[in-house]
Amino acid sequence: MKRVKAVEGLAETSTVAAMINRDHMRAFLRRAAALVAFVAVLWAIQVVNWITGYGLNPAFGLIPRYLGGLDGVIAMPLLHGSFGHLMANTPPLLVMGGLLVATTTRALLPLNAVVIGLGGGLVWVFGSSAIHIGASGLVFGWFGFLVVRGLVDRSLITLGAALVVGVLYGSILWGVLPGQPGVSWEAHLFGAIAGAAAALLVRTHVHAPRLGDVDLD
């Protein structure tokens, strides 16, 4: 009887584990679909923007210290200056976004609220007098979040994600420096700062063992 009960208990445990794995996979697929839909929306907006002679940029772009440009805090990541501009942002959005949807289980909305709100707000307060557009601030925010979260959380998953973005996109950090004509280095800088702040402020519920003895100095 004890052996039968043990087998039944093992079967129940396996069933529960399988159900949890299916739930995690469904959640991942929903988040991945939302990411692809977001990028598709960016391209649709770009087509409309191009058709209208890029009239959306002055209408909805972020203009520092101008109340009429404050809505650009939210709209800035949705607008681009050319198809090449959006093309340059699309791969890192998909790669870093993919890492986020795979490793951040229940905090994507708070994370993006901090990155967009804080990063865009800092650009509005401190940015140069120009129309700031583009999803690169969001890209830098996701980069800053993934790297700092790996250093703070120290789980195999988060450290692995930080390593991947560091190897693939570490060179983008040059983009936080001024001096590139037509490039909003402020959006890059403040996006990265906002992403780092989000890593410290937002609990992302990554269930993985931490490497407590890892020396990161």
Image: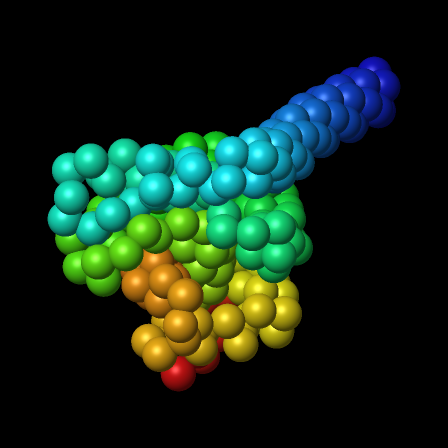
Q: Is 2 positioned to the left or the right of 113 in the image?
A: right
Q: Is residue 201 visible?
A: no
Residue 30, percent from left and from top: 65, 27
> Which residue appears farthest toward the bottom when viewing the image?
217
Write the residue at 50% across / 71% down.
172
Write the residue at 14% across / 48% down.
65
Q: Is 98 positioned to the left or the right of 4 in the image?
A: left
Write the residue at 32% across / 51% down.
131
**Location of residue 95 with respect to 116 vertically, above or below:** below
Q: Is residue 19 visible?
A: yes
Quarter containing the N terminus: top right
Q: How is the image coloured?
A: rainbow
Residue 118, percent from left and from top: 26, 47
Write the residue at 39% across / 83% down.
217
Locate residue 195: give its quadrant. bottom left
Q: Is 94 positioned to the left or the right of 131 in the image?
A: right
> Which residue appears farthest toward the front when viewing the image?
53
